[in-house]
Amino acid sequence: MNLKLDEQVEKYIIKKEIYPSYHLSKKNWISIILDNTLTDKEIIKLVEISYENSNLKGKWIIPANPKYYDIMNAFNNTNIITWKQSNTIMKGDIIYLYIAEPY
């Protein structure tokens, strides 16, 4: 199993059961063999670290052109707005909107 540990790789590869990743960046990834040399608790801890490192939320800065969308009054009646934008924006990402008009 390959796990992303980022800056923590050096801390873990001193254990004989944990190896630098073979086909991923050795700087950020480790490999473990699921043969009971590591306890379930150790594996779960490594998986949780990897999940946290791999599941980082994005931050986006997006212009809102008032000719097409009234962002200033959009939140008057609701706290949630459906916004058609790039498909790379994921649930939980932070979006910063600013008002801009082309000149």
Image (spheres, grey):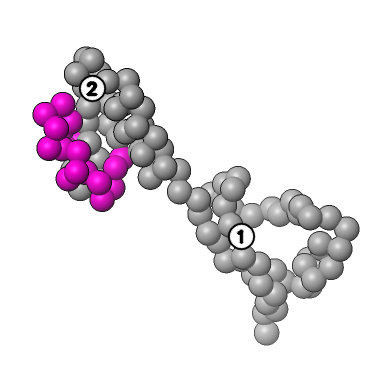
Counting residues from the start of the chain, the first of labels 2 and 1 encountered is 2
Outermost residue toward the top in this view: 35
> Looking at numbered disc 2 in the image, what kind of residue is underneath it?
Leu
Outermost residue toward the right in this view: 77
Image point 79% across, 55% down: which residue? Answer: 79
Of helix, strand and loop, which one carries label 1?
strand
In the drawing, what numbered circle is on residue 65? none
Q: Decide if residue 22 is in sight here.
A: no
- The quarter in which the C terminus is drawn is bottom right
The residue where tag 2 is placed is: 38
- Gap between marks 2 and 1, in whole Å? 40 Å
Tell me the crowding category of disc 2: few under 14, some 14 to 19, or many 20 or more residues within 10 angstroms, Cα based. some
Q: Decide if residue 48 is in sight here.
A: yes
Front label number (2 vs 1): 2
Of helix, strand and loop, which one carries label 2?
loop
Q: Is residue 64 above or below residue 24?
A: below
Image point 11% across, 29% down: which residue? Answer: 16
Tell me the crowding category of disc 1: few under 14, some 14 to 19, or many 20 or more residues within 10 angstroms, Cα based. few
Bounds of the magenta segment: 4-24
Which image quarter: residue 25?
Answer: top left
Membership of 7 in magenta stretch: yes
| Front-lying residue, 74 or 6 | 6
- The quarter in which the N terminus is drawn is top left
> Looking at numbered disc 1 in the image, what kind of residue is underneath it?
Ile
Image spot of residue 22 (x, y percent)? 16, 34
Q: Is residue 80 left or right of residue 40?
A: right
Q: Is residue 75 left or right of residue 11?
A: right
The residue where tag 1 is placed is: 95
